[in-house]
Image (cartoon, rainbow, N blue to C red):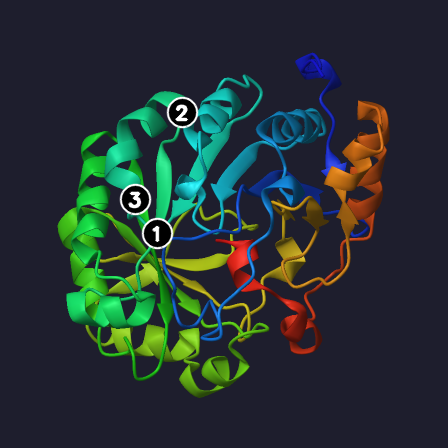
Amino acid sequence: MEDRPMNEKMSLCDGYGRVIDYLRISVTDRCNLRCFYCMPASGIPFLPHEKIFSYEELLRIADIFINLGIKKIRITGGEPLVRNDVLYFIDQLGSRRSLEELTLTTNGTLLAECAHDLYSAGIRRVNVSLDTLNRKRYERVVGVDCFPLVLHGIETARVHGMRIKLNVVAMKGVNDHEFSEFVRFGIEKNIDVRFIEVMPHSGNTDIARDMYISSDEIFNALHKRFSLRPAENAARSTTARSFSVGESGIKVGFISAISHPFCAHCNRVRLMADGNFRTCLFSDSGINLKKVIERGARDEEIETAIKTAVMQKPFQHRLATTASALIMHRIGG
């Protein structure tokens, strides 16, 4: 599908008048880490390759979304950089002239070796998941001793000109004594930091209950040590409440899906690696666009299916009732 002329550009709206212009694409459910709060100790069945979108299918779907008004795409996983030839896919997406921003969420372990190609493909901002700044604790959290690789990846990406943001899942008894260290690390490296409330899903309901820390608790602890003021020019649709840290130039954000839901201004949808299209992260319903493609649908039919699904986007998440159906490693960041 060719891009429409700019004067024919569409807007994708849901039934509540929210403009949907941000798509997250999970290119794989596989990951090279085993974070205990994400993957159950009993192990996980990965999707067979034939059940996952091909790059050709993903590019076709992405073009349809772009023509419907999507301005920003985030590549995620699992761990997106473990998928074979993912740099080809990212490079192809980066060539879409109507796409205003292409970003990536990664655990950082493969970032150093990919940084040059990612920048060449158009990636300018990368979110790196990092829950502790202590090497031994990192290994206990993720199951692998690769903390130096992550730090090297962050530094390499910075050298190549990419803006880095750290995603920190806040967990009581695990990293709650490190929050100030993360802010100091951010100031030192000129990196923004976001603290994320641990969210329940099918494999971690006990962990999410026992380790939960509200973003208000984190904010109050940090506010005693740092000058925090509401960030200027923050988009209404952002998931994080953002605060500037003194005169450092960095921001600290709080993603509070449980204590402060941000649904009213949500502008995003998700496409899973297996084809499931989620209009809400915590929704257990949706349409499988891979199956729509496989039955021979034309682009116009796929476009109609997307618009119909978006019109049914719920006004707010139902995390309390859908958590048991969530498989977090398939959803990604």
Task: Work out whether residue 134 can be spotted.
Answer: no
Q: Mark 3: few, some, or many residues within 10 Å (few <14, many ≥20)?
A: many
Mark closer to the chain start, 1 or 2:
1
Q: Which residue is mark 3?
A: 164
Q: Secondary structure at mark 1?
A: loop
Label 1 crowd bin: few (<14), some (14–19), many (20+), radius 10 Å? many
Disc 2 marks a residue whose amino acid type is: Gly
Residue 122: which numbered mark, if any? 2
Please determine whether, in this image, residue 97 is positioned above or below residue 165: above
Residue 107's label in the rendered image is: 1
Mark sitting earlier along the chain (2/3): 2
- Looking at numbered disc 3 in the image, what kind of residue is underneath it? Ile
Residue under the image location 33 percent in, 78 percent down: 220
> Could you tell me which secondary element the residue under label 2 belongs to?
loop
Q: CA distance from mark 2 to mark 3?
A: 14 Å
What is the crowding at mark 2: few (fewer than 14 residues within 10 Å), some, or many (at least 20)?
some
